[in-house]
Amino acid sequence: MAKALLGYVGGSDPRVLAEMRRLQQRVQDLESEIIRIQAENDALSAAARHDSVLEGIDVPTAEPALT
């Protein structure tokens, strides 16, 4: 029954296997890219928190912008 559903009786089609390998490689490439981008984003977020312009403002003595 499974062979009938897949549409063949013999061995695996080399084109299907090649496409499967290509897609698996693409998934691995995309996963690597996600990890790289997440690490870069984490580094940028940490740098933004460290160099925040708002850190230099003394909140208790700051004056309101509009009165």
Image (cartoon, rainbow, N blue to C red):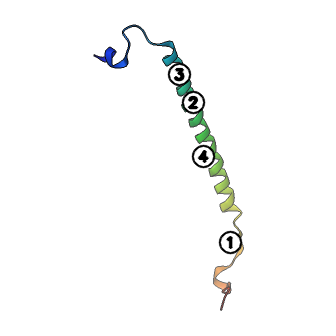
Which quarter shows the C terminus? Answer: bottom right
Residue 14, given in percent of the width and then of the height, sits at 50, 13
Foreground disc of the pair 3, 1: 3
Q: Which residue is mark 2?
A: 26
Q: Earlier in the sequence, mark 4 or mark 3?
A: 3
Q: Which residue is mark 4?
A: 38
In three-dimensional space, the C-alpha distance between marks 1 and 2, rounded to whole angstroms, equals 42 Å
Q: Which residue is mark 1?
A: 54
Q: Residue furthest left?
A: 1
Residue 48, given in percent of the width and then of the height, sits at 68, 60
Q: Earlier in the sequence, mark 3 or mark 1?
A: 3
Q: Earlier in the sequence, mark 1 or mark 2?
A: 2
Foreground disc of the pair 4, 1: 4
Determine whether the residue tagged by mark 4 lies in a helix, strand or loop: helix
* Amino acid type, mark 1: Leu
Residue 43, given in percent of the width and then of the height, sits at 66, 51
Q: Residue furthest bottom?
A: 67
